[in-house]
Structure formats: C-alpha cells, structure tokens
Image: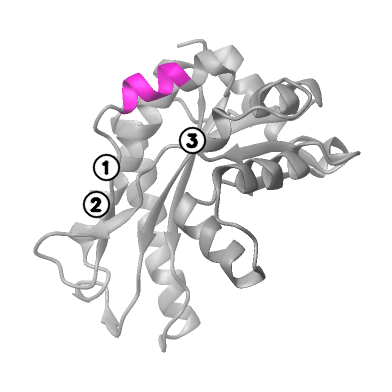
C-alpha cells in the first residue's frame, strides 16, 4: 500500500470546492430512464450518453472525479480513447462503483446488506490497471418506527454493513484505490429528525471502528 499516493488522490478529490460526478447507474436503471424518454435501451445509446458527459467542455472546472459503472470502463469514445482515458486526459480522476447492490439481510426482515466482496480483490486489480484511482461502495440502512435496539435498523444490520464496508475499503487500499465509504442512512419515513441523527451517529461510529480494526488508513488523509 502506497499511503502517500492514496493520500494525494484523496486530497485531489476534495480540493478546490469541486464535486464528484456519479455516472454509475446500472444498466437496468439507465435503461429505465431511457425508456421514459423514448431513448433506445442499447449499449450504444448508453455509450453515447456517457461519452457526452465525459467530453463536456469545461467539466474539469467543477468536477474532480467521476464514478463509473463497469460497462462504461470498457467503452471507448468515438475519438478512440477509453472513457477512463478521456477523463484522465481532461484532468478528472476516474472512479468505479464496485458493490453489487443491496440485498435482503437473511433473518432480518426489512433490512438489507450490500453484496460484492466475492472476487473483489481481482476486480480492483483490473480496474487499477485500467486507470481507475478510487472506488465507491454504498450500504443502505433504513429506519422504521422504534428506537435503536427496538425496530429497524437493528445493530446486527449496521454491524454487518460496517464490516463489509471495512473489508471493501481495506481491499481498495491494498489495490491502490481510494475507497469512498458510504453508509447511507435513508431519511424517508415517519420518524423524527432526532431519530435520523441517532441512527446516523451510531452507524458512523461503528463504521469507523470497523475501518480501524480492519487496518485501513484513514486518519489525516484529507
């Protein structure tokens, strides 16, 4: 692990008040959006759409990094360079979504666990070789009536997602990619703002504990 390189990339991603562009919609999600607009749901249509984004003039003035979907990393622009190469040439850091989506958490109805650890080490090595320099993994933590310990989320759900986030992050750093760790506490519901704060606080504490226990380097990175 080259911690200096990882720190440099992390700092570049958050420098100069720029943002990250999330263009990592899965094929089904992208096709659903195309269908509503009467756009053909084809690989070429998706490639053309994403090329239009990647080659937008002046994009680097506002965007420090772009999160891609696997399909996009394997596509090329009409001019020849790959999408990753086009971003890099434009001064934007390429990233990649690597989780496989949220699935029902066994034995915990109404809760989800994000999957994708199987084969992740090999996938990360491939993405790094292709030019990606950071990755994203999203965990979904829903809130329903009740308090922590009595309702959703259960502590088991938070801990399970925190563990997978930490494993993902450690594998990213091993491969030379900066991990974006995203424990997303869903705000939707009838619960109070204070309940959302309570769950978010606990989720972040457990995630950072797991990151530390997994050997991830995160203190002072930005």
Residue 104: x %, y % from top left: 21, 62
Report the residue marked by disc 1: 163
Tell me if residue 133 is in the magenta stretch: no
* Residue annotated with mark 2: 159
Residue at screen point 64% across, 29% down: 94
Element marked by disc 2: helix
Front residue of this view, candidates 94 and 221: 94
Q: How far is the residue under mark 3 from the one under mark 1? A: 24 Å
Is the residue 18 above or below the residue 195 in the image? above
| In-image side of 112 versus 1 (left or right) | left
Q: Which mark is residue 6?
A: none
The location of residue 192, given as percent across then percent down, is 45, 85
Q: What is the secondary structure assignment of the residue under circle 1? A: helix
- Residue 141 is drawn in which quadrant? bottom left
In the rendered image, the quadrant that contains the C terminus is top right
Which quarter of the figure has residue 107? bottom left
Packing grade of label 2 (10 A; few <14, some 14-19, many >=20) is some
Q: What segment is highlighted magenta in the picture?
A: 120-126
Quadrant in which the N terminus appears: top left
The numbered disc on residue 70 is: 3
Tell which of 39 and 169 is nearer to you: 39
Relative height, residue 197 to residue 60 (above, below): below
Percent of width and height locating residue 218: 49, 30
Q: Nearer the viewer, residue 123 or 12?
A: 123
Instruction: Find the distance from the CA under tag 3 to the CA under tag 2.
Output: 28 Å
3 vs 1, front mark: 3
User: Magenta: predominant secondary structure element?
Assistant: helix
């Amino acid at each position: 692990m080259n911690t200096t390189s990882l720190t440099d990339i992390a700092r570049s991603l958050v420098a100069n008040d720029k943002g990250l562009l999330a263009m990592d919609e899965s094929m089904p999600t992208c096709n659903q959006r195309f269908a509503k607009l009467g756009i053909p749901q084809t690989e070429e249509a998706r490639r053309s759409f994403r090329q239009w984004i990647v080659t937008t003039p002046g994009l680097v003035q506002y965007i420090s990094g772009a999160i891609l979907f696997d399909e996009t990393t394997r596509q090329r622009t009409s001019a020849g360079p790959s999408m990753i190469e086009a971003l890099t040439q434009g001064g934007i850091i390429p990233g990649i979504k690597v989780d496989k989506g949220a699935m029902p958490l066994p034995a915990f109805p109404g809760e989800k666990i994000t999957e994708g650890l199987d084969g992740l080490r090999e996938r990360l090595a491939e993405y790094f070789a292709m030019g990606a320099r950071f990755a994203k993994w999203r965990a979904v933590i829903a809130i329903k009536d009740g308090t922590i310990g009595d309702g959703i989320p259960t502590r088991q759900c938070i801990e399970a997602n925190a563990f997978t986030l930490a494993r993902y992050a450690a594998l990213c750093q091993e491969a030379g990619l900066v991990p974006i760790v995203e424990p997303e506490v869903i705000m939707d519901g009838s619960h109070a703002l204070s309940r959302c704060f309570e769950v978010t606080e606990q989720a972040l504490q457990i995630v950072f504990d797991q990151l530390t226990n997994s050997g991830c380097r995160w203190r002072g990175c930005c």
